[in-house]
Image (cartoon, rainbow, N blue to C red):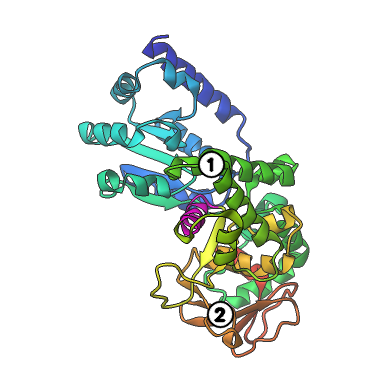
Amino acid sequence: MDIGQVIERLEIRKERLLGFLPEKRRLYFEELEKRFNDRGILLTGARGTGKTTFLLLMAKKRGYFYIPADDPLILDVSFYDLMEKVLTDYKGVILDEVHFLKGWSKFVKTFYDAYPNKTFWLSDSSSIVLQKSLEDLSRRFVIINLPLMSFREFVYFETNDVLPKIEDPFDKHQLEIAKDISKRIDVLSHFRKYKEQGTRPIYLEGSFKEKMKNIVEKTLYYDIPYFLKEVNENYIGVMRAILSHIAYSKIPTINIEAMCRNWGIGKPKVYELLNVMEKVNLINIVEKEKSTKTYTKGSKIFFQDPSLYYVYEGEIGNYREAFVVFSLKEKGNLYAQKDDSKGDFIFNGISIEVGGSHKSPKNSDFVIRDDVDFPIKNIIPMWTLGMLW
């Protein structure tokens, strides 16, 4: 097959994909598009959050050539020759899931420098992709992350209602917006549904639990091997054990020593696995403030996607803290509180306690409560953190 035939087939596939895109798109896409001004961009984000949908729409709008890096078609020709032809005829190129392309950083660097008037946008599920090629590409490419879907976006998908953002849930003036929203919709009913299946637009297709389990499996077996020097079944077993512990343990920490004994591996390897699991969007690690240790013992560890606690029918109590982490880490500096009597977390200098509808503030500045609809004094309804974007 010659270059022209491959390009034609890729264009046909792009148009077919565009034809099947849902009419309703994530609200975050508007904000994302405003940030897509640089010539070199790497879009990261978990599987199923809408990266491909966004890039297809941008390819159509900007007249860029879209290449899914896992498409076997591109193996039939020289990728170098393919890129030269594409960059002759198009304003730019989009490489989706770039880590599937062997030697991608060398190709991108070469063509980025050789075609200074062309745009190069890449996507991948992990920012670690760029970190592995940091020396060559760090000064050329901007990293932009597409977060999981917010509660505000979920309400839009469910009702067509575009609710106002709550920019700062700890600001009493902003919380007046929360009171208005509570009068406008049944927030607790929608939030209960969101907690179970609302973090990714794929929920609209049905079978959310099965799709999420498949995403975890693909991440373990297809994504993680790209970021470790060696992978064996023992390492996969360790990561499965970590995920199981996160799902069912009442305490969101990992006993590293026990993990090493049970699986016969050293601490550095366990910490490496944890680091990679965070980079590929499986977990969030929340360290204690001002820790100077290379490996922070006692760090809190959660599913990065809080809905996984429901998917695996795990410890729902940890959902609350996981949701707070998922929401606030996008907006500032979040740490685990060293002294439990002062709360669970510190966010931008504010101490926070997290719990159910009757949780006391302890000695914290604010308590974030689940299953309450209205803010009162220093009591913040948990759902308001889902209105940040």
Q: Give how far apart the Cα atoms at labels 2 and 1 are.
A: 53 Å
Q: Nearer the viewer, residue 99 or 358?
A: 99
Amino acid found under the numbered disc labelled 2: His
**Secondary structure category for the residue under label 2:** loop
Cβ–Cβ under 8 Å for marks 2 and 1? no
Secondary structure character of the magenta stretch overall: helix
Q: Residue furthest top?
A: 1
Tell me: residue 332, above or below residue 220: below
| Any part of residue 165 in sight | no
| Residue 271 lies within the magenta run | yes
Location of the C terminus by quadrant is bottom right
| Any part of residue 40 in sight | yes
Amino acid found under the numbered disc labelled 1: Asn
**Res. 232 mark:** 1
Location of the N terminus by quadrant is top left
Question: In the rendered view, does 308 fall on the left or right side of 73?
Answer: right
Tell me: residue 94, above or below residue 200: above
**Res. 173 mark:** 2
Question: In the rendered view, does 51 fall on the left or right side of 361?
Answer: left
Tell me: residue 115, above or below residue 262: above
Question: In the rendered view, does 364 fall on the left or right side of 11?
Answer: right
Name which of mark 2 and mark 1 comes first in the sequence: 2
Q: Quadrant of residue 264?
A: bottom right
Rendered location of residue 261, percent (x, y): 58, 60
Query: Which range of residues does the magenta coloring cover?
Result: 269-281
Q: Quadrant of residue 183?
A: bottom right
